[in-house]
């Protein structure tokens, strides 16, 4: 794995807008049907809490010292219109992978919409920096490999906090690793250089600065992030987004952009 860890702070804090939830599922083998007993708790999905808490503490420390100051500086010196363009560009660049996952999920119509949105913005939106597709009422679609695996039966997965790369589950971490190898964002980063990954990470981290007050108010920020992440991912797989307020639904799931750091030595 070759990644710039700057983006990971956004993944670490992307769920801060959520309140802790009582919705959860226990780890179940892939072939077993999903059941959701009413007395399930989030802790059932966190058998490695000792390790996860240590990684959480490490990640929060690195974010406080490195990633957050960089994101704050980026937000202060970059005009809002430029930041919006950067966000549009990376979000649009992720649409081909979204389309692939929707196709694998048996949703060819939505897959076509995602590809159409990608082409429309790329052609008429200056490579995707503008978003004319939204003005043309072409809906934004969102899907990832973790969701695809969930729809094929792997609905429950243990919580896992990765060093630098933040919260996830065993299923979702595997999905991110796969996305790294096929994503246009990763391809662009490997061809153009580490600057792509650097800007991608800055944009991702800056986008969640507005949610930090919720973290500061939490009695246990580890539990807040864990419960919010698991709740959001459950609803992402089970299509219960209608049961959640809009502030629980992020614009997109962050990828792990691939970058070959050997080019830094050239």
Image (cartoon, grey):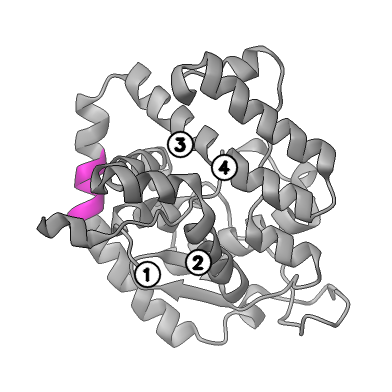
Q: Is mark 1 on a helix, strand or loop?
A: loop
Please name the residue that numbered disc 1 is placed on: 1
Dot in front, 4 or 1? 1
Q: What residue is drawn where x is 33% and y is 65%?
A: 2
**Label 2: how many residues lie within 10 Å, few (<14), some (14-19) or many (20+)?**
some
Please name the residue that numbered disc 4 is placed on: 250
Give the mark, 2 or 4, whose residue is nearer the N terminus.
2
Q: Is residue 1 magenta?
A: no
Please name the residue that numbered disc 2 is placed on: 177
Quadrant of the rendered image containing residue 111: top right
Instruction: Give the spatial CA distance, label 4 vs label 1.
Output: 26 Å
Instruction: Give the spatial CA distance, label 3 vs label 1.
Output: 21 Å
Is 202 situated left or right of 10 in this image? left
Confirm or deny contact between disc 2 and disc 4 (CB under 8 A).
no
Q: Is residue 39 visible?
A: yes
Please name the residue that numbered disc 3 is placed on: 90
Quadrant of the rendered image containing residue 262: bottom left
Q: Give the range drawn in magenta.
A: 66-71
Instruction: Give the spatial CA distance, label 2 vs label 4.
Output: 21 Å
Instruction: Give the spatial CA distance, label 2 vs label 1.
Output: 8 Å
Confirm or deny contact between disc 3 and disc 2 (CB under 8 A).
no
């Amino acid at each position: 794995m070759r990644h710039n860890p700057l983006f990971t702070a956004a993944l670490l804090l992307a769920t801060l807008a959520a309140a802790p939830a009582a919705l959860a599922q226990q780890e179940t083998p892939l072939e077993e049907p999903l059941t959701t007993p009413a007395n399930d708790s989030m802790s059932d999905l966190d058998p490695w809490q000792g390790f996860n808490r240590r990684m959480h503490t490490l990640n929060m420390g690195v974010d406080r010292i490195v990633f957050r100051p960089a994101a704050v500086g980026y937000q202060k010196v970059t005009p809002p219109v430029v930041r919006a363009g950067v966000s549009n560009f990376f979000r649009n660049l992720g649409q081909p992978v979204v389309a692939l996952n929707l196709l694998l999920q048996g949703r060819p119509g939505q897959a076509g919409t995602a590809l159409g949105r990608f082409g429309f913005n790329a052609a008429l939106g200056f490579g995707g920096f503008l978003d004319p597709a939204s003005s043309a009422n072409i809906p934004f679609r969102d899907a990832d490999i973790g969701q695809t695996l969930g729809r094929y039966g792997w609905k429950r997965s243990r919580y896992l906090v990765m060093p630098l790369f933040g919260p996830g589950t065993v299923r979702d971490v595997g999905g991110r690793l796969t996305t790294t190898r096929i994503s246009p964002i990763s391809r662009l980063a490997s061809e153009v250089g580490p600057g792509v990954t650097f800007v991608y990470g800055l944009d991702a981290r800056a986008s969640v600065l507005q949610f930090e007050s919720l973290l500061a108010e939490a009695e246990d920020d580890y539990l807040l992030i864990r419960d919010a992440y698991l709740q959001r991912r459950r609803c992402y797989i089970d299509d219960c987004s209608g049961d959640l307020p809009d502030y629980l639904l992020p614009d997109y799931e962050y990828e792990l952009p691939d970058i070959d750091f050997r080019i830094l030595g050239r």
